[in-house]
Amino acid sequence: MSELVTGEAVALELRPARLPSRGLATLLDLSVVVAAYVGVSVGLAAVTASLDDAALVAVSIATFLLVLVGVPIAVETLTRGRSLGKAACGLRVVRDDGGPIRFRHALVRGAVGVVEILLTAGVVAVVASLVSARGRRLGDVFAGTLVVRERVPAARADAVPPPPPWLAGRFAGLDLSGVPDGLWLAVRQYLARMRQLDPGVSWAMAERLAGDLAASTGVGVPPGVPPAAYLAAVLQERQVREARRAFGDGRGVGGVGAGAVGGSVAAVEQSGGPVGPVAPAGSVAAGEPVEPGVPVRAEDGPSGTGSVTGFVPPV
């Protein structure tokens, strides 16, 4: 990895292309360009057969400059640093600050490449790449460019990490209605990829997102809570609230087993009639209305047995 600092003081971690991949990309580019040069030369030879020797030399030099030098420069300029060979090998030419190259960068690289690649059969370019810490040839040094690996192995998408246990439920009373959806998306994407970022950059992004989230909720970040942990805890609180709205709070029939339901039916049959719509004393809550069809269980009542005291039949 090579760390580059942009004009906004952001550290970028790039993967410089090494000699084998760069050599293969250059070989592919040269094969295409030389084949085009040979084809154009043969065609011009048939057309300019009647010209004198001076004119033939001028045509040959112009063809060499246009095809072997001008075409690579034009291709790198139009594709922002991706020639045919570089695209096949997953490489790209970028500036030293990580930005896309322009015509002047491609022009310097192409002009110097005539000497270090074409006239010396690539010997100078190979030596310069081996000596350079980032694998740059002389054309890259003079142009202020760098060839990087644009296509890297895809990393497995990490799940959003949970907050620390000591933050569980701490933000239950937080008002999240004013937080925009774009901020939630940014928080989730950051938490999923924060392990892939530079530690300094990750901390700065977490502080900025935590500040935006605190401004949206109207409550500041608690002292002593790391910004990334604060983001994870608030995001988890939002997910819990969405789950409650979608599936309920989970305090329905699921808490009573099949045996309890059978016992409630027996209690109704023995009593000779249905139990009213209000739970009796010692049930779930004295005087609290009970939904029809839900068994009423005594919890911590006077008897302490925890048995079913009644059953409200469906209306």
Image (cartoon, rainbow, N blue to C red):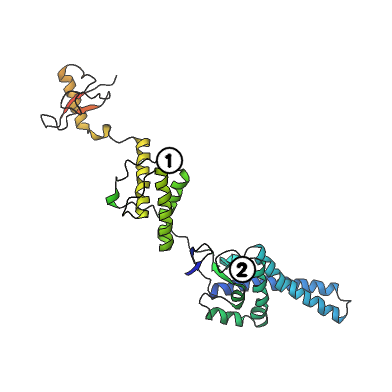
Dot 2 falls on a residue whose secondary structure is helix
Q: Within 10 angstroms of label 2, few (less than 14), some, or many (20 or more) residues?
A: many
Left or right of 142 in this view: 130: left
Q: Dot 2 corresponds to which residue? A: 85
Instruction: Establish if 19 lies above or below 79.
Output: below
Residue shown at the point (53%, 80%) measured from the top left: 130
Foreground mark, 1 or 2?
A: 1
Q: Amino acid at mark 2?
A: Gly
- Residue nearest the viewer, comparing 189 with 307: 189
| Residue 156 at least partly seen | no
Q: Within 10 angstroms of label 1, few (less than 14), some, or many (20 or more) residues?
A: few
Viewport quadrant of the C terminus: top left
* Horizontal and vertical percent position of residue 302: 11, 29
Q: Are marks 1 and 2 in contact (CB under 8 Å)?
A: no
Left or right of 118 in this view: 294: left
* Horizontal and vertical percent position of residue 261: 21, 28
Q: Quadrant of residue 136?
A: bottom right
Dot 1 falls on a residue whose secondary structure is loop
- Residue nearest the viewer, comparing 75 with 7: 7
Q: Residue furthest left?
A: 303
Q: Residue furthest top?
A: 272
Left or right of 22 in this view: 157: left
| Residue 91 at least partly seen | yes
Sequence-first tag of 1 and 2? 2
Q: Amino acid at mark 1?
A: Gly
Q: Dot 1 corresponds to which residue? A: 178
